[in-house]
């Protein structure tokens, strides 16, 4: 059996954001926790730089040049999104690691993997850096899987506490990517209403699952079990990518939700079991998570869950919130409605 893969790179520490929650110490904390556990059996890989054509499959040339120039000049994109000269290399490695991960997964050379790189990516839109994000790492990797690696359907599950507006926008009209996001709402960045299900040929292929502040494990696990999983089975992806943010942890200083460290392990085990049932590999890419201890422990729990798969704990009864979400999503995915009712 080949080993699961962990993509990392020193360049992640050179994206200097100053006094900012999204900082290099996040990676230091994650790697210290993993090293203390002998990396959980994961094989370490240095993340390569993303090839320019990979970036250009999602972002226009002007955006790629803007990231390079803003970094060189230390010119922030907005008050949330500062950059430094090291940000360019870090951004290339963050996108490149995600691409390398999907290459290994789809070639069958690894059972699963995790990218512990920064900056994160799910807020970056095709033409806009924002929300701590420069390039849309997961979207770039999904596009790569579709364009070059033989995948026809990619499921992106975003469990970061913030809505992944970038991924949402990039694949809004595409039926090739099923984008499912569980996020606190109303909250930054303001997008991600339940009623936003995609557009055009992509109508139904965006599943936005907003939860109120104070939501906890039963809400997140219930939405995964009763909404995301039946839709994913009907979609039948060739690849599953997790936009793995850890700011829904109860200790997080930015998020307002109440997940525990073990919840992330349960989410990961369920997603691995789902992917196994579909014959698709699953990989995770780091997004947010700003309490260093909670972040590091939750990454460990997630990486363990991705290897283990399954979830031997009882399923969660659908709450009114889950039932309402299933009603909406069931308009496009009939199995969802049936599942929640049963
Ligand atoms: Zn976030």
Image (cartoon, rainbow, N blue to C red):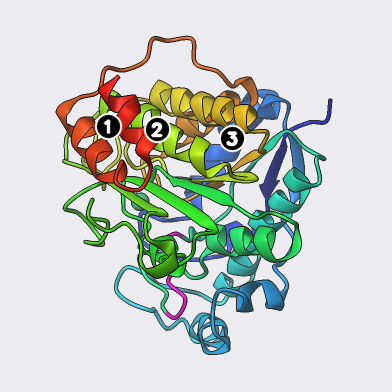
Mark 2 or 3: the one toward you: 2
Q: CA distance from mark 2 to mark 1?
A: 9 Å
Residue occupying the point 63% across, 25% down = 36
Q: Which residue is mark 2?
A: 294
Ligand 1 near label 2 (Cβ, under 8 Å)? no
Circle nearer the N terminus (2, 3): 3
Q: Which residue is mark 3?
A: 32
Left or right relative to 109: residue 135: left
In front: 129, or 176?
A: 176
Mark 3 or 1: the one toward you: 1
Residue 92 picture quarter: bottom right
Q: Which residues are magenta?
A: 122-127
| 35 inside magenta stretch | no
In front: 93, or 192?
A: 192
| Label 2 CA crowd tier, 10 Å (few <14, some 14–19, many 20+) | many
How far across and how far down the image is residue 188, in percent? 24, 58
Q: CA distance from mark 2 to mark 3?
A: 13 Å
Q: Which mark is residue 132?
A: none
Residue occupying the point 73% across, 33% down = 111
Q: Which mark is residue 250?
A: 1
Residue 224 picture quarter: top left
How far across and how far down the image is residue 305, in percent? 56, 24
Left or right relative to 26: residue 146: right
| Label 3 CA crowd tier, 10 Å (few <14, some 14–19, many 20+) | few
């Amino acid at each position: 059996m080949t080993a699961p893969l962990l993509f990392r790179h020193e360049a992640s520490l050179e994206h200097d954001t100053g006094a900012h929650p999204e900082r290099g110490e996040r990676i230091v904390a994650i790697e210290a926790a993993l090293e203390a556990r002998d990396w959980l059996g994961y094989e370490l890989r240095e993340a390569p730089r993303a090839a320019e054509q990979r970036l250009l499959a999602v972002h226009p040339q002007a955006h790629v040049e803007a990231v390079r120039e803003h970094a060189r000049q230390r010119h922030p994109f907005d008050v949330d999104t500062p950059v430094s000269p090291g940000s360019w290399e870090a951004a290339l490695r963050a996108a490149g690691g995600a691409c390398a991960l999907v290459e290994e997964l789809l070639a069958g050379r690894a059972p699963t993997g995790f990218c512990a790189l920064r900056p994160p990516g799910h807020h970056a839109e095709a033409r806009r850096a924002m929300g701590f994000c420069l390039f849309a790492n997961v979207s770039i990797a999904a596009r790569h899987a579709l364009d070059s690696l033989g995948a026809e359907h990619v499921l992106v599950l975003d469990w970061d506490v913030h809505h992944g507006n970038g991924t949402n926008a990039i694949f809004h009209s595409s039926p090739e990517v099923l984008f499912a996001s569980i996020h606190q709402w109303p909250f930054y960045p303001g997008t991600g209403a339940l009623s936003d299900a995609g557009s055009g040929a992509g109508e139904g292929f965006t599943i936005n699952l907003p939860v109120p502040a104070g939501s906890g494990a039963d809400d997140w696990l219930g939405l995964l079990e009763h909404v995301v999983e039946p839709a994913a089975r009907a979609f039948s992806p060739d690849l599953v990518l997790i936009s793995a943010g850890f700011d829904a942890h109860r200790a997080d200083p930015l998020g307002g939700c109440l997940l525990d460290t073990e919840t992330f392990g349960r989410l990961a085990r369920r997603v691995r079991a789902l992917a196994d049932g579909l014959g698709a590999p699953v990989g995770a890419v780091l997004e947010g998570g700003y309490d260093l201890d909670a972040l590091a422990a939750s990454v460990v729990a997630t990486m363990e869950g991705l290897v283990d798969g399954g979830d031997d704990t009882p399923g969660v009864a659908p709450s009114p919130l889950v039932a309402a979400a299933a009603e909406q999503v069931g308009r496009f995915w009939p199995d969802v409605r049936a599942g929640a009712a049963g």
